[in-house]
Image (tube, grey):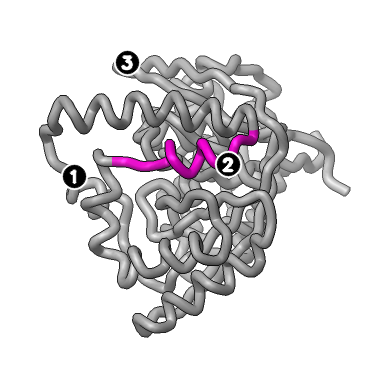
Amino acid sequence: MHARSIVVPASTANLGPGFDSLALALDLHNTFVIEPAEQGKEISIRGEGSEELPRDETNLFMRSAERVFTYFRNWPPGFRIQADNQIPIRSGLGSSSSAVIGGIKAACVLLDEELDQNAILSLALELEVHADNVSAALLGGLVVVGTHEQEVVARKIPIPSISVVVVLPDIHRTTSSMRNLLPTRVSHADAVHNLSRTALTIEALRSADYDLLGWAMTDKLHQPYRSKLIPGYDAVQQAALNAGAAAVTLSGAGPSMVAFAPSNLHEIGAAMRAAFLTFQTESRSFVLGLDQIGTQVGDTA
């Protein structure tokens, strides 16, 4: 087998009201080049996280590949992985989901085996609790997701190509710590709010109706709790709206914030960064299109 590449997109999950059930794949990628070796397992990393991600069997990519080897009861003698990471870690942009899907796909390539969508997502859920992120990373586009025990049901909903601006503040919050902020019970009214807004968010994205999106992309289940740990969240959100954004929401559990608008995305990103600076917080921004394809496996150049 010659070297093969696995390209996995970033993702932004929840999309406001769609807590743990909606995600978009974005045009920002981690690329994993895999080739067989006579013995041993070697991973090299460049780009995002290269200074801190482990290079042994505790690496999430390696653990995901190992899960597939165990599934097929077949272990290759050795392999080498070169990871080129564009997705910032701990950003709310699905970097861990990218590693999980990349590891599963790489293992299938090494073993010359195939797994269908359901099997991939079921294995991924053992390693990554965010079924929305892994589904978007695998399928691309807008996905709606449901889970029951280890079963994942994911469907891709066709929407027109859009672009968003993502602003990542220089603060460090783990996804687990952000999830621990959430209440164990919610009111009936809050649940109904999110159910109706989730359906309308899907329709707004499907029809590119930014007025509807601005009304629908509100949440009462997770953002009121998580946003309190992001300095200046309300001011940054308002700065984006003032600059022309139709809707602004956390990306996943944060700390990234994502703004939706039909135009002026660079100006919106600049306004958001300026607002963060008033709270002594540096940030960086990305203007990203929609990845409609999802994970791709191909030959190296």
Q: Which residues are magenta?
A: 208-219
* Count of numbered marks: 3
Q: Is residue 29 left or right of residue 51?
A: right
Q: Which mark is residue 102?
A: none
Pointer 3 with pointer 2, Cβ within 8 A: no
Q: Residues within 10 Å of mark 2 (few under 14, many from 20)?
A: some
Residue picked out by circle 2:
210
Nearer to us in this view, 151 or 206: 206
- At x 51%, y 39%, the residue is 213
Amino acid marked by disc 2: Tyr
The answer, for residue 34, to whether it is visible in the render is: yes
Amino acid marked by disc 3: His
Which residue extends farthest right?
301
Give the alpha-carbon distance from disc 1 to disc 3, as whole Å. Answer: 21 Å
Q: Quadrant of residue 3?
A: top right
Q: Earlier in the sequence, mark 1 or mark 2?
A: 1
- At x 53%, y 50%, the residue is 246
Give the alpha-carbon distance from disc 1 to disc 2, as whole Å. Answer: 29 Å
The answer, for residue 66, to whether it is visible in the render is: no
Q: Position of residue 273 (x, y in %)?
A: 50, 74
- At x 54%, y 18%, the residue is 155
Q: Is residue 81 left or right of residue 234?
A: right
Q: Position of residue 194 (x, y in %)?
A: 31, 31
Q: Quadrant of residue 128?
A: top left
- At x 42%, y 51%, the residue is 249
Q: Element at badge 2?
A: helix
Q: Which mark is residue 182?
A: 1
Residue picked out by circle 3:
148
Q: Earlier in the sequence, mark 1 or mark 3?
A: 3
